[in-house]
């Protein structure tokens, strides 16, 4: 399998993410997340999956202060799940304001990033490949992509 994904120097997709605040739906916009900001965005195949739950999300939560001390304005966790699943996952791990969950249930961001992968063998359908990136004002400053030969969970 080969991914043709966006690289360092490319702009991230101009998409929005459907979230709920105060029991109301709203779109969290590209501008709200990326415009004029330095952020870390990490993407995972699925909420509640073993490695993502035991290691990846908690690791970013534990390192939040260090990221902020290095000039990062926000940390975002993206997965091809809906808002309710992402929020339940956040609550189950007691994630507070350290990391903001981004549900990409329609796969818009993931597809436009070139990170959409087929995981039918695991019963997942299409999901995001595991990666992390530093984004400055909407442009990828650094991107770290999991080894494509690792089947992941």
Image (cartoon, rainbow, N blue to C red):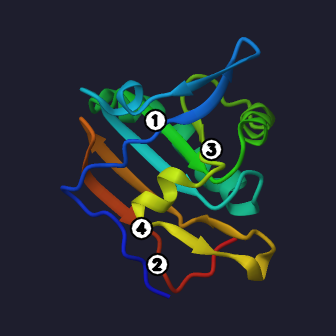
Query: Picture coordinates of residue 57 (x, y %)?
Result: 61, 47
Which numbered circle lies on residue 58?
3
Query: Picture coordinates of residue 148 (x, y %)?
Result: 48, 81
Tag 2 residue: 147
Pointers 3 and 2 in contact (C-beta within 8 Å): no
Circle 2 SS class: loop
Circle 4 SS class: strand
Q: Earlier in the sequence, mark 3 or mark 2?
A: 3
Query: Picture coordinates of residue 23 (x, y %)?
Result: 76, 15
Q: CA distance from mark 2 to mark 1?
A: 22 Å
Q: Earlier in the sequence, mark 2 or mark 1?
A: 1
Is 15 left, or right, of 52 in this rendering? left
Pointers 3 and 1 in contact (C-beta within 8 Å): no
Q: Residue at x 68, y 76 (%)?
A: 119
Which residue in the rendered view is the most extreme toward the top? 22
Tag 1 residue: 75
Pointers 4 and 2 in contact (C-beta within 8 Å): yes
Which quadrant, please, contains the C terminus?
A: bottom right
Q: Residue at x 72, y 11 (%)?
A: 22
Pointers 2 and 1 in contact (C-beta within 8 Å): no
Q: CA distance from mark 4 to mark 2?
A: 6 Å
Q: CA distance from mark 3 to mark 2?
A: 21 Å
Q: CA distance from mark 4 to mark 3?
A: 18 Å
């Amino acid at each position: 399998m080969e991914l043709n994904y966006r690289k360092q120097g490319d702009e991230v997709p101009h998409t929005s993410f459907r979230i709920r605040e105060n029991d109301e739906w709203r779109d969290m916009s590209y501008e709200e997340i990326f415009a004029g900001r330095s952020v870390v965005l990490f993407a995972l195949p699925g909420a509640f999956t073993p490695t993502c739950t035991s290691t990846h999300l908690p690791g970013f939560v534990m390192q939040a202060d260090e990221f902020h001390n290095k000039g990062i304005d926000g940390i975002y966790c993206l997965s091809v799940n809906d808002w309710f699943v992402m929020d339940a996952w956040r609550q189950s791990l007691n994630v507070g304001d350290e990391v903001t969950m981004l549900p990409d249930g329609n796969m818009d961001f993931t597809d436009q990033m070139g990170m959409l992968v087929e995981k039918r063998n695991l019963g997942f359908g299409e999901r995001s490949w595991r990666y992390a990136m530093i984004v400055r004002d909407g442009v990828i400053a650094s991107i770290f992509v999991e080894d494509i030969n690792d089947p992941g969970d």
